[in-house]
Amino acid sequence: MPADPAQDLALMAELAAGRDSALDQLIERWEGPLRSFAHRYLLNSTDTEEVVEEAFVRIYQKRADFVPGSNFSAWIFTITANLCRHRLRWRRRHPSESIDIPDEDGAPGLGSTIADRGADPAVSAEGNERIAALRTAVDSLPHDQRTVFLLHSYEGLSYREIATAVGCSKRGVETRLYRARQVLRDKLAALLAIAA
């Protein structure tokens, strides 16, 4: 995640004032973190690319609505999380075959992984099973819990930033994160017990 919130606020002020090239700088700063979050949420590279592109379109369209001095990272992750949720709903209503190349473990849309040349194949296979089990468990979380879990565990946002992004209190974030961890612990124990 970009380390200079003041620069994000300055760029948003420039964008709101009509300097469209400020969007290019925001894209340069935020494309990686948004892609990372969306990819973990959607597990599909095509959907990820489309959601990230749409997030920047929304930022441009809503540039006048951004409140100067507010938390930009929370705002941009809120937009992206909502787009991810809408994309999953659409995908459930319009199922289709994925054209993404599956991983070695069969997970859709994550590309191939390169195994460590010196690694024991049995250890690599076990690691891939655990990664697949984690992906499956995270994918099964409700939207609110999945969003909080991904923003905290992978994007490193604070409870306060997450609370702003998802529209709840810090205590609500703690509760959602606790519940998500409980569900993951239970599901992973069951999935890994079956695999063993």
Image (cartoon, rainbow, N blue to C red):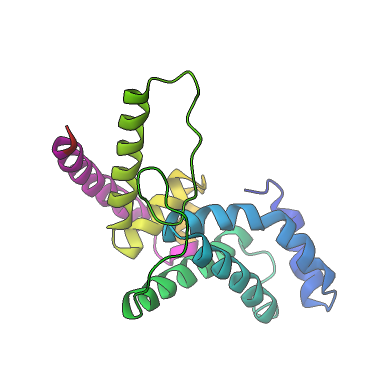
Instruction: Name the spot of residue 24 as percent of width and height, x first.
Output: 78, 65
Magenta part mainly helix, strand or loop?
Answer: helix
Instruction: Name the spot of residue 71 as percent of width and height, x first.
Output: 61, 61
Give above or below for 151 relative to 130.
Answer: below
Instruction: Name the spot of residue 64 as percent of width and height, x first.
Output: 70, 80
Within the image, what quadrant is residue 10 found in? bottom right
Residue 52 visible (yes or no): yes
Q: Say left or right for 66 vs 180.
A: right
Range shown magenta: 165-194
Residue 174 within the segment the image draws in magenta:
yes
Tag count: 0
Residue at 82 percent of width and 70 percent of height: 14
Residue at 49 percent of width and 56 percent of height: 39
Q: Quadrant of the C terminus?
A: top left
Q: Nearer the viewer, residue 150 or 96?
A: 96
Residue at 52 percent of width and 65 percent of height: 46
Instruction: Name the spot of residue 11 as percent of width and height, x first.
Output: 78, 64
Within the image, what quadrant is residue 127 found in? top left
Give above or below for 164 relative to 191.
Answer: below
Residue 173 within the segment the image draws in magenta:
yes
Residue 159 visible (yes or no): no
Q: Say left or right for 122 vs 25.
A: left
Give above or below for 48 relative to 130.
Answer: below
